[in-house]
Structure formats: structure tokens, C-alpha cells
Amino acid sequence: MVFSEPEGLLKIAIADLETAEASSDPAVFREGAWGFWLQQAVEKALKAWYLQLGGDPPLTHDLRRLLLLLEAEGVATADLEALAQLTVYAVQFRYDADPAPLGLDREAFNREAKELIVRVQALFIPGSEAEG
């Protein structure tokens, strides 16, 4: 099966979310490892959404910037703002030998990321009532 670019990105976002969910136990996985995979899932979902709207997403890991691009297209993103905190995991936490943990609620953030992915998936279903 051949996927469009946004559909392909969304499939990768789903796989990244699965990895983040599998990395949710703080007794086993450091926060940076979990956060990296969750940030990647959110980034790819937001880029898939922007592509589906006809945009050309920039090469960036900045989730706030991606949210602003979606807002410029008329998408209400206020409920997604908390996810922008994950941007720090894309770069800083990968290259900092001793980062101060943010102490985020992993299960809650996993849930928010999953809700985002479901919201974006709805854009690919013909006749969907999804916002976009």
C-alpha cells in the first residue's frame, strides 16, 4: 500500500507513540528517552496535519512553532499547548549528560499525544467531522 506523505508521517508517529508508551516506566527508562519518543510522535502528527491542510512544514523540532502554523490555518490548538513542553526532549535532553528532569506525568502526556494522533487520523477518513 502506498501512503501519502501525511499518512506516512502519521504511521511513523503511531510507531513513535508505541515506543514512548513502552518507555513509560520511570524505574526502567530515563525521562529523556521516553520524552524523545513522545516528542517525535507529536512532531510527526503535527506535521502530518499541516501537510494535510496543504502546508509545507519546516524542518524543525519546535512543537510550539508547528502549533502556530496550524493556528494560522484556522485550527484551534489551545488544548494542545501542554504538548509543546516536549520540544526540550528533541535536542537538549539528547545532548545533555545530566539534564534536570521535568517530572512530567508520563501517562497523561502519552494520553494527550494519543488523542492528537486520533484527531489527525480523523482527517484521513472521508466524511469525517474532524476539525481541520
Image (cartoon, grey):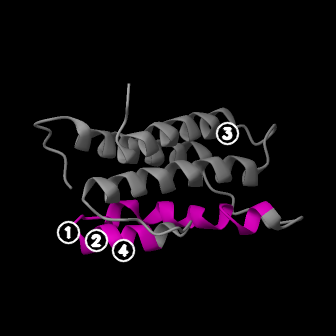
> In whole angstroms, how far apart are the C-alphas of marks 2 and 4?
5 Å
Residue for point 67% across, 39% down: 24
Image: 10 above or below 71: above
Residue receiving disc 2: 71
Q: Amino acid at mark 2?
A: Glu
Identify which residue, 42 or 23, lies in the foreground.
42
The residue tagged with tag 1: helix, strand or loop? loop
Residue receiving disc 1: 74
Residue for point 34% across, 72% down: 69
Write down the region rendered in magenta: 65-94
Q: Nearer the viewer, mark 2 or mark 3?
A: 2
> In whole angstroms, how far apart are the C-alphas of marks 4 and 3?
28 Å
Q: Are marks 1 and 2 in contact (CB under 8 Å)?
A: yes
**Could you tell whether 30 is left or right of 58 in the image?**
right
Q: Residues within 10 Å of mark 1 (few under 14, many from 20)?
A: few
Q: Amino acid at mark 1?
A: Gly
Measured from the top left, where is residue 84 in percent x and y? 50, 66
Which quadrant would residue 54 be assigned to in this image?
bottom left
Q: Amino acid at mark 3?
A: Ser
> In whole angstroms, how far apart are the C-alphas of marks 1 and 3?
33 Å
Q: Are marks 2 and 4 in contact (CB under 8 Å)?
A: yes
Q: Earlier in the sequence, mark 1 or mark 3?
A: 3
Q: Nearer the viewer, mark 4 or mark 3?
A: 4
Q: Residues within 10 Å of mark 3 (few under 14, many from 20)?
A: many
Measured from the top left, where is residue 73 in percent x and y? 23, 69
Q: Earlier in the sequence, mark 2 or mark 3?
A: 3
Residue receiving disc 3: 24
